[in-house]
Image (spheres, rainbow, N blue to C red):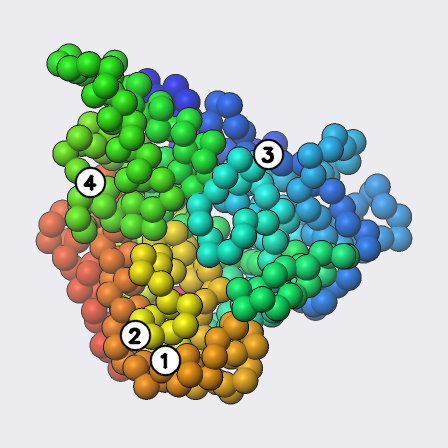
Amino acid sequence: MVISGSLGAVEIPESDGAYGAGAVHPLEAMFPRLRTMDGIDQSAWMPDAEPVFVHPDLRAAPNGGANGVDPLHIRLARVVTRNESTEADGMRFVEPGVGRTFLVDGIAIADEPQRHDFSCSGVGLTCYARGGFADVGRDLDGMVSLKRALHRKRTARRLEAIGCRAPTVVAIYQLPARMVRMLDGTVSPAVVMVRAFRSIARVKQLDPIAGFFHGARSGAIVASALVETVARRATRLASPIEAMHHLATAVTRSYAAADDLARLLALIEPLPAPACPVRQLRLDAIRAYAPQLLRLIAVREGVAAAGSGFRRAMASHAAWFCRALGAQLRRMRDARFLHDYHHEGVRRHAAGWLYTLVENNVTLACEFADLETGLFVDDDISALCDALQLTPEDVSLLRRSYDAHHRTDLEMARRIAECVVAIGKLCDALTRDTGEACLDEFTRGYLSSSYAEGAHSCPS
């Protein structure tokens, strides 16, 4: 289905029945796509990649084309290539606007059926990143360092142990002769990091357009399509200059902005008046797309029956999501965990830093998807400095000011809950009163002692 029947550059799947219909990956047909960029990259197997870690219960379907080769290695130790390949298993699907990660199918963790989606990060620049991408804080190279991969692995395991949700790092493969320059000037080997998610879909992806703005090329395509649609619909458009102003507004206010969804939903400072026609198109797109994606997640998580209607599934998911998110923030506070070390006074803090606890880094299954900047502040100082390239003074400051910094995490998490609730209202699944009740669940989850006592209070 094309958004509103007229935004010809972007296509949205028509129903959640599309799950599993993708030619390359089961989720391929669930995500929107550009007519001129299908999100498929060719990958090349790296036979010399060294396994640093492989989960002992990770399984892969046999690969008939490589006798005697570990099927996990041949499926996972891969990077993006621009060369033509005849490999039957070489094509990989990339979520809209993702810069260094593709999805992989055909693997599973024994006895963990709730881990549905698997991704490989550090595979090089994807089709969305080639040609320019959002600022990620260091040179854009599409790689993941061994130091940060091991940090994510440890952090995710510890968060899960205290009852939080995080994607499990199930494999790390070191790539031959590739190094990543860290922010402190040191180097670390480049790796492919494989993670297992309950759901790969992020809260921000309820807006089918937002992710495309992360890439320069895809963002320009979508921005142009939005503005052209507005221009066609406008009956009193003053001049082509006004149309170009809409385009400039769409790009400058939406391009890769971490708070784009919150602004779009008017939860924080809204988009400026000239962007209102573009905003309405994007809200229409959310209304068309979000219900089907949320119903899939609600059924996966067991908070809605398979036959539930869209509105009932969305309402059930919103209440569950808010409660689970609040409960996890309480557990993080008790363990003195921070999602992001970039706070005022820390050496690498800079004005305008995009705080990482945002809608693009929490999945619809209420997982904390990106733990690159997360830390337990009371860990050994030398270990934290080595893993995150902090100074002892940075760690001491984060310890002293933990309560204030945790309040930032709490405020950002509540905004994510507010986005889910606002989309429920937009899609007529929640009323003002039921939406407020969902946000009360966030507070109840955070304050209730029952959520802080054990690892099983939040649905697993």
Quarter of the picture holding the N terminus: top left
The tag earlier along the polypeptide, 4 or 2, is: 4
Q: Is residue 170 visible?
A: no
Disc 3 designates what residue?
Answer: 40
Secondary element under disc 1, as helix, strand or loop, is: helix
For image coordinates 55% across by 82% down, the residue present is: 383
Instruction: Tell me if label 1 and label 4 are in contact, CB under 8 Å.
Output: no
Disc 4 designates what residue?
Answer: 271
For image coordinates 54% across by 29% down, the residue present is: 38
Q: Determine the CA span between mark 3 and mark 2.
A: 40 Å
The label on residue 405 is: 2
Quarter of the picture holding the C terminus: bottom left
Q: Determine the CA span between mark 4 and mark 3.
A: 32 Å
Where is residue 172? Give x, y as percent.
67, 62
Q: Determine the CA span between mark 1 and mark 4.
A: 33 Å
Where is residue 99? Give x, y as percent.
52, 45
